Each structure stands twice: as structure tokens, then as C-alpha cells.
Amino acid sequence: MSDVKTSLSDLNERSRDIFRRLVETYLETGEPVGSRTLSKQLTPRLSAASVRNVMQDLEEMGLLDSPHVSAGRRPTHQGLRLFVDGMMEISGVSPEEKSTIDRGLGADAGTVEKMLDEAGAMLSGLANAASLVVAPTTDAPLKHIDFIALSDRQALVVLVMENGEVENRLIEAPSGLTPSAMQEAANYLNATLRGRSLAEAQRILSDQISARKRELGEIANRLVEVGAATWADTDGSAAIAPERLIVRGRANLLSDEELARDVERMRLLFEDLERKSDLAQLIDLTDEGDGVRVFIGAENKLFSLAGSSLVISPYMNSGGRVIGAIGVIGPTRMNYGRIVPIVDYTAKLVGRSFEPRRRD
């Protein structure tokens, strides 16, 4: 196998035709493709021997390999990359698929988290793969803050954002907490922070808590300090509602026989999908443009499953800022021409869900 990267210009018309038909047949069936199968598809028809010679040349270029000596050929990861970049025909999103996505992401989708969960579930089902959704951090202005006592030792901080999102954070209640102290703390925070983003709120509280300490009672002051700490990271930055990874459809990965046979690689992939530390890197994968990107096999450094592909797109808010990512991970033989437009359409629709809604 050649280590030199092959381009389309290195292939003559016959080689391109045979290579394209072989890849399309493999992606459809998941099985290595033989020369006899291809010879019947070609116009004008070539003998199986002639097709076999071309396939051998393609194998020497690193575009094909064979799982067994007597088996047909299948595309390598390098071959799939060449096909995706230069030969793949994008099918477009069918009316039925658009209708399914539109209904799931409609105005009655509920909370942002529920909407993103629905988007992941739909994408997983349509692609027959596992879906990945990186939910955004909350940067909407605060509308209202409240405290709810759950027990002598615990209380709930309820943050209502102006875009309708609600964040709940459990805190350790100060000793001697009373309803009047909770009301006093809530009144202070609402008067000080209403209309501010969480990052702004954190900076304001850092500056004002010490200076205005005497305005509050002792218990209310401690409640404000504990409550403020729930949306501060260890470095003091706003960290409430951190990026979250929503994974749906893991079982779809097990339906691919080739992947399912490698139990250890599947286990490693599932462990990767449970990790939260690589979410920023997942979004970084989309930084080179505002469209869908395809990572085949070892091109994707985030997941351990070398026999998988990642199709991912950023989604943006109304200001054009990337706030999250959505995509699918599945076998390398996935139907890229169909899945790429589905991911693209879903990402754009999710982004529009973050546009400000008109108020009556």
C-alpha cells in the first residue's frame, strides 16, 4: 500500500468510475465488492479481469484493501476521504425527513434542553447512528432569582433567564435559614443582578459582596455568598449551565456487525462518550467553517473507535457566534451523501431556535 496521498487527478476516467461504484456499493451493503459485481454495473461493460486489474492498481494507491485474500475490495479510510471530498453526491433532505425534524424542533418543543434532546433523538433515528449534541452555556440575561428551602441542610437556587430558560442549583443551606432570610437574599440579588448575564453577575457580586455586606442580615449574606458560588468556577468565572454532551442512540452502533464484533473498541468508545472533558475540542473541530465536517477513522482524535466516522456541524445564535455542535458518530460505511445534509439542516434549525422570539 502506498503512503503517498492520492488525489482525483491521479485517476483516469475508468479508474474513477470503478472506484466510485465500488465505494457506493460498499456503503450500501457493508460488504467487500468483487470485480464481477462491478463489471455488470459498468457501461460499456468491462470484463471481470479488467476490473480486477484496476482494483489492484487502486489498492496499490492505498484507496482499497481486502479483508481476505479471496474476498472483494473495500475502501480504506484514505479512499473514503477521497470519495467524500471529491466524488460524493449530496442527496438533499427529503420532504419526509424535513417534516420529521421540523415537528420535533417546533415552537412547542419546551425547554432548550428538551429541544436539544429531541434533536439528538431525531438525528440518531434518521441516521441510524449515535447522535452527539453539545448544548451551549447559558448567556441570556437574568430575569429572576429565588431560593427554596428543601430541608434544614439544603436549599435550591432558581435562576430564571429572560429567554425562558430555568436553571436549578442545589446548595448547602446556612445554619438557621429562615423564610425571611431567603426573601431578603432574593430581593438583594434581583435588585442587583436583573438584566445581567451570569458572567456579569459573577463580576458584580465579587465586587459588591464585601462592600455591601452590612446591608444584609448575617444569614441572608451567607445565603447570597453560597448561592453566588453555585455559578462560579474555581477560577471565579461564570460556570452555571456548563456545556453538556447529549448522546442518543448508542444502541445503533451495536447494529453494525463489524463494529459490534470488536467488543473492546466499542467499550472504549462508550467510555469516550461519557467523558465531559473533550466538549470544547468537539466544538473546535467545527472551527474551520460554518458547515458540516466529516472525520473518518483516525482523523477523529477524540474517540477511540478507529472504525468510526464523525459527521458534525456547529450551530450558531442570531449573532453568528458558534454556541454548540451537533452531529452523528457511526461506522465508516455510513451513507455520507444522505447524512451530511440531514446534519446540516438540523444544525441550522437548532441555531434558529436560539434567535430571540417576538413578544406579543
Image (cartoon, helix red, strand yellow):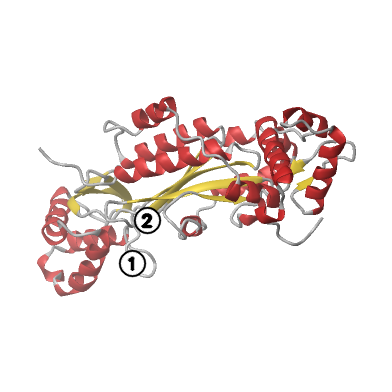
Residue that numbered label 1 is attached to: 237
Image quadrant occupied by the N terminus: bottom right
Residue at x 81%, y 38% (from the top left corner)? 51
Between 346 and 133, the one nearer to me in the picture = 346
Q: Position of residue 223 (x, y in %)?
A: 23, 58
Secondary structure of the residue carrying numbered label 2: strand
| Total number of numbered discs in the rendering | 2
Residue 83 appears left or right of 40 = left
* For marks 1 and 2 on the same chain, the one whose residue lies earlier in the sequence: 1
Whether residue 245 is visible: no
Residue at the spot of label 2 = 322
Q: Quadrant of residue 9?
A: bottom right
Label 1 to label 2, Cα distance in Å?
20 Å
Taking 280 as reference, is 272 above or below it?
above
Between 82 and 262, the one lying in front of the other is 82
Q: From what the image shows, is residue 141 above or below residue 25?
A: below
Identified by mark 2, the residue type is Val
Expressed as whole percent of the image width and height from the top left, the position of residue 321 reads: 33, 57
Nearer-the-camera pick, 348 or 227: 348
